[in-house]
Amino acid sequence: QSKRQLKEQSKRLSNRRKNKMLRRVFAICFVSLLFCSLLLAKEDYPFLGLVSRDGINVRAGANINFETLCKLAKNEKVSVIGKSYNWYKIALPKDALCYINERYVALEDSLGLILGNRVNIRAKPGENFSIIGRVNKGERVKILKKSGQWYGIEPTENCFGWVHEKFISYYSEMNRGLLSAPVVANKEGPAKS
């Protein structure tokens, strides 16, 4: 009986080792599969994002050294257009203030008719501030105030800002047609400030 008991004990130990090995192999496969799926996961733009905290700065570029354009409130929804490193590119909310040089605008009540092509929209009133969008001849902008030789305007569809990804979570898909603007070849020369 002792030989039989030893044989059974040896068999049990062998089964335990096999089970342990199978669990390890399964765990390694599972972790590898999870890791690969995370690496291959690609964010799809545009999407609607939800702001996670109050007072989040929207910047003129993908870095904290750029000008602050406006602040976002907790649970505010924003249109996320793209990403650069850890920063999301968003369509500017209507309460962000942008600036355009008065020499490229003809006033029509509270609207401005754009007189040139590829006219820069800036983060602040001055040519040394970041370009956050552009408009073309014949487009209209809503003028909110005047600051020296610059008009403060409501953001156009082509004005964008940047928010760090840790402050925005995915909320839902967006209709891709909402943010698409026709791309027009530049035949008019360099941009104007």
Image: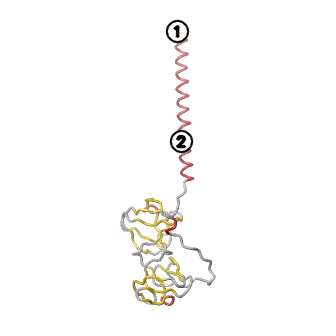
Q: How many marks?
A: 2
- Foreground mark, 2 or 1, reads 2
Q: Position of residue 124 (x, y in %)?
A: 45, 81
**Residue at 53% across, 39% down:** 27
Residue flagged by tag 1: what amino acid is it?
A: Gln
- Marks 2 and 1, the one that precedes in the sequence: 1
Q: Quadrant of residue 188?
A: bottom right
Q: Residues within 10 Å of mark 1 (few under 14, many from 20)?
A: few
Q: Position of residue 163 (x, y in %)?
A: 46, 67
Horizontally, residue 187 falls left or right of residue 63, namely right
Q: Secondary structure at mark 2?
A: helix
Asked if residue 58 is positioned above or below residue 25 in the image, the reply reads below
Q: Nearer the viewer, residue 82 or 46?
A: 46
Horizontally, residue 156 falls left or right of residue 75, namely right
Q: Nearer the viewer, residue 117 or 65?
A: 117
Q: Residues within 10 Å of mark 2 (few under 14, many from 20)?
A: few
Q: Secondary structure at mark 1?
A: loop
Q: Position of residue 47 (x, y in %)?
A: 48, 62
**Residue at 40% across, 83% down:** 144
Asked if residue 171 is positioned above or below residue 191 in the image, the reply reads above
Q: Tell me whether the residue at label 2 lies in contact with that at label 1, contact meaning CB atoms closer than 8 angstroms.
A: no
**Residue at 52% across, 18% down:** 9
Horizontally, residue 192 falls left or right of residue 170, namely right
Give me the C-alpha separation between circle 2 and circle 1. Answer: 43 Å
Horizontally, residue 97 falls left or right of residue 39, namely left
- Residue annotated with mark 2: 30
- Residue annotated with mark 1: 1
Q: Position of residue 118 (x, y in %)?
A: 56, 82
Asked if residue 113 is positioned above or below residue 76 in the image, the reply reads below
Residue flagged by tag 2: what amino acid is it?
A: Phe
Q: Nearer the viewer, residue 36 or 158?
A: 158
**Residue at 43% across, 75% down:** 69
